[in-house]
Amino acid sequence: MAEETKDGPLEDMSALQDQLDELNAQITKQGSHVRQLKKDGAGDAITEAVAKLQELKVKSAELSEKLESDAPKFNRKSFDDLVLRKMFVVPSFEIHGGVKGLYDLGPPACALKAAMIDLWRKHFVLAENMLEMECTCLTPHAVLKTSGHVDRFTDLMVKDPESDECFRADKLLEDAIDNLIEENPTMSTEEKDKHLKVQIQADAFSPEELDKLLLEYNCKAPSGQNYSPSYPFNLMFKTSIGPEGTAVGYLRPETAQGLFVNFRRLLDLNANKMPFAAAQIGLGFRNEIAPRSGLLRVREFCMGEIEHFVNPKDKSHPNFSSIADKGLVLFGRDDQLGSGKTKLVSAGEAVKTGLINNETLAYFMARTQLYMEKIGMDPKRLRFRQHLKTEMAHYAADCWDLEIQSSYGWVECVGHADRACYDLDVHGKATKTPMVATTRVDPPQEIEIAKLTLDRKALGKTFKKEQRVVSSALEALAEDWSTFEPIATALEKEGKAMVDGFEVTKDMVTWAKTSKRVHEIKFTPSVIEPSFGMGRILYSLLEHSFYQREADEQRCVMRFTPQVAPSKCAVLPISSSAETNAVVDQIAAELMESDLSTRVDKSSAALGRRYARSDELGVPFAVTVDFQTLADETVTLRERDSTRQVRLPKAEVTPSIFAIIHNRLTWEKLTARYPMVTVEDGA
Amino acid sequence: MAEETKDGPLEDMSALQDQLDELNAQITKQGSHVRQLKKDGAGDAITEAVAKLQELKVKSAELSEKLESDAPKFNRKSFDDLVLRKMFVVPSFEIHGGVKGLYDLGPPACALKAAMIDLWRKHFVLAENMLEMECTCLTPHAVLKTSGHVDRFTDLMVKDPESDECFRADKLLEDAIDNLIEENPTMSTEEKDKHLKVQIQADAFSPEELDKLLLEYNCKAPSGQNYSPSYPFNLMFKTSIGPEGTAVGYLRPETAQGLFVNFRRLLDLNANKMPFAAAQIGLGFRNEIAPRSGLLRVREFCMGEIEHFVNPKDKSHPNFSSIADKGLVLFGRDDQLGSGKTKLVSAGEAVKTGLINNETLAYFMARTQLYMEKIGMDPKRLRFRQHLKTEMAHYAADCWDLEIQSSYGWVECVGHADRACYDLDVHGKATKTPMVATTRVDPPQEIEIAKLTLDRKALGKTFKKEQRVVSSALEALAEDWSTFEPIATALEKEGKAMVDGFEVTKDMVTWAKTSKRVHEIKFTPSVIEPSFGMGRILYSLLEHSFYQREADEQRCVMRFTPQVAPSKCAVLPISSSAETNAVVDQIAAELMESDLSTRVDKSSAALGRRYARSDELGVPFAVTVDFQTLADETVTLRERDSTRQVRLPKAEVTPSIFAIIHNRLTWEKLTARYPMVTVEDGA
């Protein structure tokens, strides 16, 4: 029945979710109020406010539970069948036997990805004047040695001693824990929690710890023996560049390095203004030990990375106020190891309480959330998980992964890392290139410095042609007393000190602590890096978009938003007459002229069957040219999810759909303009 | 002076070119007329028509000469400086010393490329419902062994025996010939032609021929010795996929193979309808021996490839009539080895006379020409060069390269190849997968076949588990007497025959020639492949877009069309007052909301200086907020190439530019609507 909304339960759920979100926002607000009262020492008022807060929390918990039990079940068989049959995603080189971890995007996924990337570019690059680059995948050894990837971009691997088959050690442990819990349904919550806490840290253990745990959890290789000891396996694809075969190169594991090494040119192009962001969309490669989980863990993938360069002493963001009220579902590290529950907190509140390290990091997290909502991701299945201390690099200030829930569980899809000044620092040192920006100090300030007297002779004798490097390094440190002080102490106490890997002795330099009036300060910028796994996002979107019609499980639908849908409109003739076909061709041509991708289906299948086909591809609208069209030049326009139809003049089809795609009209407003049609479409 | 057209000479040239094009079209028409007369044996009328034709040709030659001498000189120094300074293209990993043949695209080139690709997708994929895919770069050995790349994707290399430095042998020969001609200005035309004919075939010689020629032309290695003998060097980057290190993989040298191996799924998705095209945009890799010529010969590049699958017996194209009259500058193989001159011929005429092998090939050539014009390439510097017989693969039916003229000469940027059924054939055979399509025969036809009786026992004894493969191969051949006849003859005469690599003997099979009524015929489709080198096209477009203002050589301009320009509009305040800045921000925000990339320049530089900056980036329009704006809400709008300005209400800026970008308005029409402003802009 066309008048009935077929996805009623989903709409109910969305209303429930809205209530829940609102409730959670109230909780956040009330929590903030309670904190303020406590701060003010408000006495009785506190008790009252806390009681109110508790009440809100109970309501919220009830609603959450209801929502979860109402969630529709995911039908993997139907989903996988649709994805393969319609060529959203297919295994690469299938007729040659395929290669694990490599997948091709077929026509509908290709168009979907193009739309996602177009929106990404508009949402991030264009909206904030980011400097987008396209650097090469082929990367010479020196760059990845400097970045640390040659030494540390590894996973711990074990082998079956009999077959030499390779496995990822942390995944074996995770699986063993899953199995243990599944096989022991009567396990106490306490014990379960203990195992889960081991599981959540699986990729952070040392080789020795992992070996011990694999034994403890009784993990056996397929041959029945114990696994070999674990050892780090480098995940970069290695090749050699040039005909001589002597220059080692790798396929980049991330796009970021290309931006870091271009920092000086970028800063210059930006007229030396800070802060600014560079961005890149492109391929990354990772020679996974044992790829699985379809598109979620692959060996070649599309990334979108942003490197926001900022003064480490001022990580505020000029547009922060625009997203300060945006609610984010946060799973902080304390909660991961404690309650196991997420919190809905506004970006502003999260920065204020120190949960998120700084404004810029929180700003990008909120922008990521908005992007996900824009492309049609289910907001109920998004959360930000903070990295555990053990997961983070030593230099990182804070890291939050946007995780998306799919049938594979919660999967990291966008990293948000404050990498401090590590990256610029290492490349600067390795190439002896100053990777610094300048900030004006207005009014000028007095700062404490060390005034050096260098003994050029002594330096020259020891360091020869490296003399200049050492003296420059000393002078750079002397610009600020706080950075020179440790050197001064070492020289005084031990007679020598290490400066950028060189041993400087007391005879080479004398100093005086003094002060200087400065108009500008040089600094190595910090980098805040949102890093998007586009393939994972695309796969998650496919799952979030998939549903089966209530009335008929056979009828699968992809609920892509009109903005990202691979095809915008289907055009179907009700008969095969030349007259009807001519109108179909004319409407299709008009749509195409407005760059609206169109799908003509003139097959002899029943109309309902043809609607179903376009539903499977997630085409949001279908125009049908019927007998009435020939009489009065009107056609029907059907919306995919409601299956409702209106009748409108054929000349108004293209402008209407164009307006919807460009966010200037909604289907609801359109239905108010034209008469609704009552027809059975078989959906 | 704003009223004057600054690029007057260019406009004159364009008028000359129009005359020339028209003249050449008349020549084509007259030529066709002469041919018809000759065919009809028209006597005296022929002499008259030929005289007319000669007269037209003389006029055309005069005009061409004039055009060439008037062509502005290309200032490489200014061009290279601009390209690097504005970060259109920069060497990759520069601070680490760089890698030959690797370049990064900076912000303006990145936006330009995105616009080029967007137009490509609309012009080719969307407009013809091509099936776009995105396959992986990592490719297993089996696929590229099958395609022939492992054995034949090579260049001939020589070494300096002293230093082991590697060189590309054909390029050494080409350079030697260039030098010889340059050093002998008095060389006769005849002798020069002889050398040039050797040069044009440089990449088609065998190793032995090349070695002989290198000696003949006295090519010496840098050490002063003769080069080592030349040998084939495989140009693919090799790596290993998976942790075991045993699975050899390569970075794809082209995107095409991913489409070929997906042929069966694509045909199925297309409801088994033929012809159809698949397309792919993505990276290709080529380990060049000695990369040079900037972006024109690099090791990692973006390609756009189309594989049009068609019945080998019917290579007509349904939309051919839409481009039949389009004139193409063709450089056929006879002319390359003969007159050395191109011809302007319509696509229809070229197919009719057999110059271009078939409609589909000519259709794509014309579509490519249209695409180049759409993105703003200079049509005077485009030509299609046919491959010499010696350049083509043995299976290819015909190949035409679109060459673009730049300061590096005529460079191949788009290949158009009729590859017959080679690709599907080899993958089908290697994987034992039928790569066939079906065409209905209506009414049904009688065809001659061989009716086989197989001796399963004899087959089984010899071929064991391969028995089925051999019998299927025999049965497939027997479907058409013409394909079985050679087998029958061999069996009769020699008692044995080779079938797909298996030796079949007479005792295994008997046959009878008979006929069968068929309703459909199975065939292996031919592939027509337009293959775009996007990086080369981008570089050529940079050169074609670059010019210096007549009045001031220091002022460089990029004349990007509004559709591809990286930034669509600059917004400049005439003063730094808060009121002025507020208007600037408001206009910029409006432009951005309509997805029009905008460049705000609030610096204190003079207005003329700021116009010049936006000219360098090829921004087509600049809005200036001046004192009058605050009084009457109008602003000036400046067009880059003419430097003319109009004054219009600020609210009309965004809709006007949006309409121009979307081809719904032109600058000329816009200038008719609003008053022209007379100001000195310093340009």
Image: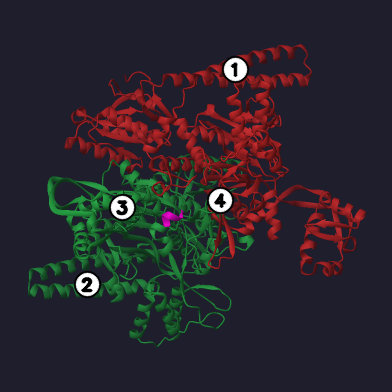
Chain colours: A red, B green
Residue bounds of the magenta highlight: B140-144
**Which residue was labeled with disc 1?**
A60
Q: Secondary structure at mark 3?
A: helix
- Foreground residue, A51 or B489? B489
Tag nearer the camera, 2 or 1: 1
Q: Secondary structure at mark 1?
A: helix
Is residue A475 rendered to the left or right of residue B454? right
Q: Earlier in the sequence, mark 2 or mark 3?
A: 2
**Which residue was labeled with disc 2?**
B56
The reply to whether discs 3 and 1 touch (Cβ–Cβ < 8 Å) is no
**Which residue was labeled with disc 3?**
B461
Disc 1 chain ID: A
- Foreground residue, A196 or A132? A196
Q: Position of residue A416 (x, y in %)?
A: 62, 39
The reply to whether discs 2 and 1 touch (Cβ–Cβ < 8 Å) is no
Disc 2 chain ID: B
Above or below, A457 against A328 in this view is below
Q: Position of residue B668 (x, y in %)?
A: 37, 52
Is residue B212 rendered to the left or right of residue A186? left
Query: In which quarter of the view is residue B350 placed?
Result: bottom left
Query: In which quarter of the view is residue B184 placed?
Result: bottom left
The reply to whether discs 3 and 4 touch (Cβ–Cβ < 8 Å) is no
Amino acid type for the residue under numbered disc 1: Ser
